[in-house]
Image: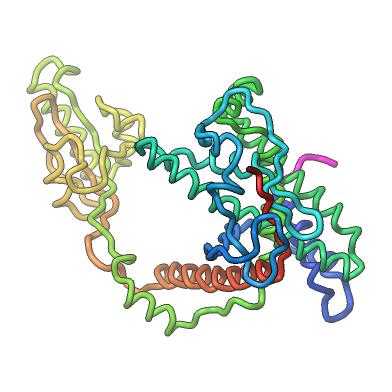
Amino acid sequence: MGAVNPVRWLFLAAAIAAVLGCTSDGTSAALKARGQAPIAPVAPPPPPAPIVPGAPVPGAPVSGAPVAPDVTKAAYSGAAAAGSGVEPIKGSVPQVKVVALVGASSLVTDQEVVEAVRQRMSELNGLDPVARKEKEKEMYAAQLRSIIARELILDEMYTKLKKGGKSALIDDIKDYAGKSADFTIRGLRKNFPSEEVFKEYLDSQGLTVPVLKRQFERQTMATEYVRSALKDKARNPGLADLRDYYDTHPDEFQTVDRVLWLDIFISFRKHASDKAALDHAQTVLQQAALGADFAALSKKYDDGLSGNQGGVGIGIERGKILPPDVEPVVWKLKPGEVGELVPTPVGYHIIKVVKRDYAGPRPFDVKVQNEVREKLMRKYRDVEEQKLIEELWRKGPVRLIDNP
């Protein structure tokens, strides 16, 4: 089969939707969805909240409330337990060390958890050795919980497929998720000049392609299953909900002074005399004031940097306008206005303001309402996802493997 393109989401979403049953007319949801538009991916479900360790010890089946791993003993093992943490290891080889069994057959390896932590190494910058080690343990525990939650979701999906007599879809779903992962990895490779450089970079970070691919493909399947399972549960906020959120979160809807301005710089050095530079600048200013295309004038006459950038001046906020000599003029002008010549020690600037945003609260207009609606829908969806994951943790089973 060919390379994956955005249409991969169409089939994958349709196939997973089939886990949840057929349509009202008895037609398979997978067949119904073939004519729909591709579905964009959503954020991965959040990991379950930490749980207080209980009586069941690592290695024993978990029933009822799940037991968090003892990250200092059972789960946080291997290199981390030895004191070397999860620093990138050049030439590292995936370790087949199982730290958890999820459901009937899903395995979580120490290597996958460690590589997930390595992808967040920037969070350790600036920490002293003791704090760094503690932070690594926290990150390891969080990633382990997240991966177990992902595997619980997939175990639920597989179980429902088999009970619904749709086991044949499992291979199709895995195939498309695998191609999606390959597509993502190819996108990462494009940031490097060659395959060799790409592999050297991964090697220097202690990351491996097989583990990355597993993460991508299994998260893709889990995300799509959660989307399908919750599509009718998260409620849609009404106008009153939007207004209430807007009124109670004013800090989220403030704007600062911003300006988009255009510039033409006439340099003394480009002319026979300061007087010649002034005469030339006044001629260009007259054209701009009469409505000539300012960007075209900048491209033709600018002696600085703006001419090659569509005439756009440097800086959009107060205190960041360059050169500082022109800032007072920039903030005085209204959108569409061209200012007088601005003299500087090295030449003249001709300024035009294109757009202004004034500091203060943003109005409760359609744009803001749509932003609030998206925030609330994401919040409602997160709540339902958390309920689903917590229920899966309660059902289990999860076995934590003690690796002394």
Q: Quadrant of the N terminus?
A: top right
The overriding secondary structure of the stretch rendered in magenta is: loop
Residue extent of the magenta highlight: 1-5
Compared across the picture, whether 59 is left or right of 307 comes to right
Q: Name the residue located 54 percent from the left edge and 65 percent from the top edge.
A: 51
> Hey, which residue is sitting farthest top in the picture?
272
Q: Nearer the viewer, residue 296 or 136?
A: 136
Q: Nearer the viewer, residue 2 or 271?
A: 2
Q: Where residue 149 sits in the image (x, y, percent)?
A: 64, 59
Q: Is residue 240 visible?
A: yes
Q: Where residue 312 sits in the image (x, y, percent)?
A: 31, 39
Answer with the quarter of the image where residue 367 lies: bottom left
> Hey, which residue is sitting farthest bottom in the picture?
240
Q: Nearer the viewer, residue 388 or 174?
A: 388
Compared across the picture, whether 201 is left or right of 158 comes to left
Is residue 126 in the magenta section?
Answer: no
Answer with the quarter of the image where residue 398 lies: bottom right
The correct choice, above or below, for 379 with respect to 268 in the image is below
The correct choice, above or below, for 211 with respect to 379 in the image is above
Q: Is residue 35 visible?
A: no
The correct choice, above or below, for 159 with respect to 59 in the image is below
The correct choice, above or below, for 170 with respect to 195 in the image is below
Q: Name the residue located 49 percent from the left edge and 82 percent from the top edge.
A: 238
Answer with the quarter of the image where residue 47 lies: bottom right
Judging from the image, the colouring scheme is: rainbow
Q: Quadrant of the C terminus?
A: top right
